[in-house]
Image (cartoon, rainbow, N blue to C red):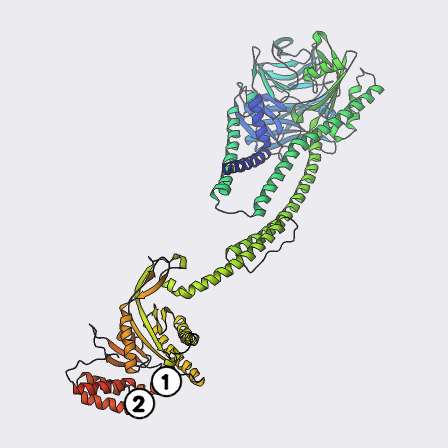
């Protein structure tokens, strides 16, 4: 189950990132998929041309900017220019000429007020430099009329000079420009009735065509019946042209213009010229055709070569791009999944985790719906509205005009243009079907010469014409540059009416409506996300309170309760947590009582000496050792108390132990082995705390005895012995009962000292090692003990004695030392005299009394060993 959950988490992350990658790189992914599937990308080109050296150039408006692709006659791409839209705005290409390093371009630019201009540009430096050479305003109500009002001929180059002609009405004006010249040089203006096409030759002459008539420098050269001459291209001493009536390429020599010969017939088996975007002639009679803005064909007379591959990325590159995007998505997905599910190096808050997931899901769903549903729906709605308008306006125009009237295209185009600026790019043409079922142009508002082949006119589609011929009318959105065109065909009495509208303005309107819908959708999404985040924040706050309560409960703090009044599972959890806290509090209380009970038998200080934290860690293998100061406290109750009832006896015992043992523990001592006559203690911090404790205990005993005296009870005797040495602490017992025990030779020494305390009537005795740490107290040397393997130097600490006795001991301390020295020097008489004097001064000095008796005995038995012995 855990593996399935982890796999599901990875798939969810990968799906979300894949969706975002698809939305982010939608145009790029769509273009690559289209190329891999059909060999054609989503880019559309508006014009294509051949250069003087046989190079090929295609240009189109894609992704908000002009792009120019360069290649050779084999379809191999050599360069790609992306032009800044601020330097070269959107429009319709009138003429295109690729030079060696420059690109000359004629462009119609349309403004939002219905005006239009024809501009001539020179583009160089790989598209980074754009120079405007000429600007001419256009007249007319519709885009075709404006484009027909001012036209530009093909560009020619001779001796580094670029030449072209600008045609307006029945006039043609010649312009020239050198490669380094920023402006143009105007030439002669010729009057040519109905001029349609022109060519400026190398010697500066103007060759112009008007339907079937050919002019040179404004003079009529000849008339070629049944021909429509267009697209002049100079080659040597003559020029090529396209006969749009017969779809054939001819060559004419300047020296003998009456002689012309056919050099190329593009129509070949397997070649479909339906939907021609532009045609371009080369100097070697090659014909370049751009079909539907996506297919580029080069006809050299003997074969037709497909150059479309140069227009798009290679399939290998597309595969690498898609693979790179997929790999990046997988790597990022794995990184996020591993950090969250496997590594768990951090814990994400609920608000962040689910908030990000919710925001990602909402963003993905909203973006996907906008991209996949709203935008296509808005475009379809725009097309549907345009179709209805075209149908109604066409029907209305046909009701008021004759079917075959030459004025019908203009009337119908202006009627549609009056419906709004989106319908200004309206082309209306009437065709008739000639011999061999070929459609021939009869009249048009786009300035196309009557008699031209329908395939070379804008908006004509053979399949759509056949549908209209069969059904009476037909409508279809045709692909092409600028989003393509919407075409409606009506067939009557052997004639075909074609109404086509450019989609660029309609798509712009659809996109504007889409952006407004998208803004509303995103605002709604943000609002819903904000509400969701508020709810998540509230839930997160409740969960944090529950988590805090659980953490406090886990830490053993049961003093706080979590109260949530939500009326749902959260309130149930808070109630359950409060009940659990109550139960834990009761259990902790019982555990505390039990622990305190255990600590009465094994205090924490003993556990600390053993290096343990809990009684459960202690067993018979537990052991510790070290050098410490030991203390033995012995006390004796009045004899009559031992004869009374047990309760009173234990009350007296516990009174002494409680009041003295608390002082020992408070000063860092660890108490062992409570008995009815005393207890032992050890000090880790050295002898100084032990001495201080001993003095404090004796002073506390004085207070106890004063209280007992005031209550009429007999006094208690308490003796203390101190030593320093190595001590071992461990556990002894059986499997049923165990006790901590401290073992050290010091305890044997201290038993001897306790015995001497009674003989010397001293309250505190210590060894020499302890006496070194008691210099700030009243200390005097008492002598050496006898009877052991090694004698022990014994000292008395008398700071715990009653004040008067302590004062006298301090006063007679030097004399006492002299007496001890005399005794151990075997001057028994002198020692006896000194101690006798001391007894007269301080009758409460038990040490002087003991040594007076000892001096008297040694004087009688001088061979006896000198030393202290207990009794």
Query: Pointer 1: residues within 10 angstroms few (<14), some, or many (20+)?
Result: few
In the rendered structure, find residue 863 and report the number of the disc placed on it: none
Label whose residue precedes the other's in the sequence (2 or 1): 1
What element does badge 1 sit on? loop
**Residue annotated with mark 2:** 843
For the C terminus, the quadrant is bottom left
At 56% from the left and 11% from the top, the residue drawn is: 303
Q: CA distance from mark 2 to mark 1?
A: 13 Å
Between 736 and 123, the one lying in front of the other is 736
- Mark 2 near mark 1, Cβ–Cβ under 8 Å? no
Task: Measuring from the top left, give residue 563's x and y in whole percent.
Answer: 62, 56
| Residue 714 position in % (x across, y down) | 40, 83
- 703 horizontally vs 764: left or right: right
Residue lying furthest left: 863
Residue 739 figure quarter: bottom left
Residue with the most extreme right position: 400
Tell me the residue at 66%/50% (across/down). 567
Which quarter of the figure has residue 809?
Answer: bottom left
Please provide percent x and percent y for residue 465: 72, 15
**Is residue 656 toward the left or the right of residue 221 in the image?**
left
Q: Is residue 331 above or below residue 619?
A: above
Residue 99 against residue 558 in the figure, above or below: above
* Quarter of the figure with residue 753: bottom left
> What residue is disc 1 on?
802
């Amino acid at each position: 189950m855990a593996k399935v959950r982890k796999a599901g988490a990875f798939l969810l992350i990968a799906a979300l990132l894949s969706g975002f990658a698809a939305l982010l790189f939608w145009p790029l992914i769509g273009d690559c998929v289209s190329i891999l599937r059909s060999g054609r990308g989503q880019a559309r080109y508006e014009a294509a041309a051949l250069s003087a050296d046989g190079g090929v150039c295609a240009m189109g408006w894609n992704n908000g900017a002009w792009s120019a692709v360069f290649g050779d006659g084999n379809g191999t791409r050599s360069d790609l220019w992306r032009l800044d839209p601020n330097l070269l705005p959107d429009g319709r290409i009138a003429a295109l000429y690729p030079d060696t390093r420059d690109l000359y371009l004629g462009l119609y630019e349309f403004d939002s007020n219905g005006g239009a201009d024809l501009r001539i540009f020179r583009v160089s430096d790989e598209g980074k430099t754009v120079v405007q050479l000429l600007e001419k305003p256009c007249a007319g109500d519709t885009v075709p009329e404006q484009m027909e009002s001012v036209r530009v001929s093909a560009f020619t180059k001779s001796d580094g000079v670029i030449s072209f002609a600008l045609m307006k009405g029945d006039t043609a004006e010649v312009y020239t420009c050198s490669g380094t010249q920023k402006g143009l040089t105007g030439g002669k203006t010729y009057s040519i009735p109905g001029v349609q096409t022109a060519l400026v030759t190398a010697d500066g002459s103007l060759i112009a065509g008007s339907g079937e008539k050919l002019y040179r420098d404004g003079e009529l050269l000849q008339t070629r019946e049944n021909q429509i001459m267009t697209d002049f291209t100079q080659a040597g001493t003559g020029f090529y042209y396209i006969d749009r009536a017969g779809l054939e390429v001819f060559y004419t020599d300047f020296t003998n213009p009456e002689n012309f010969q056919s050099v190329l017939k593009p129509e070949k088996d397997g070649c479909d010229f339906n939907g021609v975007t532009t045609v371009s002639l080369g100097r070697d009679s090659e014909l370049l055709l751009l079909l539907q803005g996506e297919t580029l064909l080069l006809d050299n007379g003997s074969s037709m070569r497909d150059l479309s591959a140069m227009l798009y990325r290679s399939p290998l590159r597309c595969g690498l791009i898609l693979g790179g995007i997929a790999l990046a998505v997988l790597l990022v997905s794995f990184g996020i999944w591993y950090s969250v599910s496997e590594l768990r190096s951090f814990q994400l808050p609920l608000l962040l985790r689910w908030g990000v997931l919710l925001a990602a899901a909402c963003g993905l769903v909203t973006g996907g719906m906008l991209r996949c549903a709203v935008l296509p729906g808005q475009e379809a709605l725009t097309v549907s509205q345009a179709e209805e308008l075209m149908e109604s306006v066409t029907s209305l125009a046909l009701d008021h005009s004759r079917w075959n009237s030459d004025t019908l295209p203009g009337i119908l185009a202006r009627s549609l243009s009056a419906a709004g600026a989106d319908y200004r790019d309206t082309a209306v043409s009437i065709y008739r079907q000639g011999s061999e079922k070929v459609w021939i142009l009869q009249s048009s508002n786009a300035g196309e010469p009557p008699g031209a082949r329908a395939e070379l006119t804008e908006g004509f589609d053979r399949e759509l014409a056949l549908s209209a011929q069969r059904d009476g009318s037909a409508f279809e959105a045709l692909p092409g540059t600028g989003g393509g065109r919407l075409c409606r065909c009506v067939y009557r009495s052997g004639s075909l009416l074609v109404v086509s509208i450019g989609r660029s303005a309609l798509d712009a309107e659809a996109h504007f409506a889409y952006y407004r819908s998208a803004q509303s959708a995103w605002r709604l999404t943000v609002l819903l996300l904000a509400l969701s985040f508020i709810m998540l924040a509230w839930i997160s706050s409740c969960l944090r309170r529950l988590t805090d309560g659980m953490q406090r409960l886990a830490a053993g703090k049961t003093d706080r309760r979590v109260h949530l009044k939500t009326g749902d599972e959260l309130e149930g959890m808070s109630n359950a947590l409060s009940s659990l806290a109550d139960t834990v509090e009761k259990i902790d209380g019982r555990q505390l009582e039990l622990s305190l009970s255990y600590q009465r038998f094994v205090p924490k200080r003993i556990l600390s000496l053993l290096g343990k934290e809990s009684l459960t860690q202690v067993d018979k293998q537990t052991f510790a050792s070290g050098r410490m100061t030991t203390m033995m406290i012995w006390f004796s109750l009045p004899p009559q108390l031992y004869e009374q009832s047990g309760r009173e006896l234990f009350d007296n015992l516990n009174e002494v132990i409680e009041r003295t043992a608390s002082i020992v523990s408070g000063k860092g001592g660890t108490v062992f082995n409570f008995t009815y006559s005393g207890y032992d203690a050890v000090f880790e911090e050295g002898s100084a705390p032990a001495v201080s404790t001993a003095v404090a205990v004796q002073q506390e005993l004085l207070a106890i005895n004063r209280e007992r005296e005031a209550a009429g009870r007999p006094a208690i005797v308490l003796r203390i012995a101190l030593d320093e040495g190595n001590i071992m602490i461990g556990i002894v017992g059986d499997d049923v009962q165990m006790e901590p025990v401290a073992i050290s030779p010091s305890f044997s020494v201290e038993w001897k000292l306790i015995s001497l305390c009674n003989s010397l009537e001293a309250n505190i005795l210590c060894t020499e090692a302890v006496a070194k740490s008691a210099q700030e107290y009243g200390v005097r040397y008492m002598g050496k003990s006898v009877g052991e393997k090694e004698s022990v130097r014994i000292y008395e600490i008398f700071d715990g004695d009653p004040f008067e006795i302590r004062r006298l001991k301090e006063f007679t301390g030097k004399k006492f030392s002299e007496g001890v020295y005399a005794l151990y020097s075997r001057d028994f008489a002198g020692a006896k005299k000194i101690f006798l004097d001391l007894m007269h001064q301080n009758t409460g000095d038990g040490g002087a009394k003991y040594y007076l008796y000892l001096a008297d005995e040694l004087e009688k038995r001088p061979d006896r060993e000198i030393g202290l012995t207990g009794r």
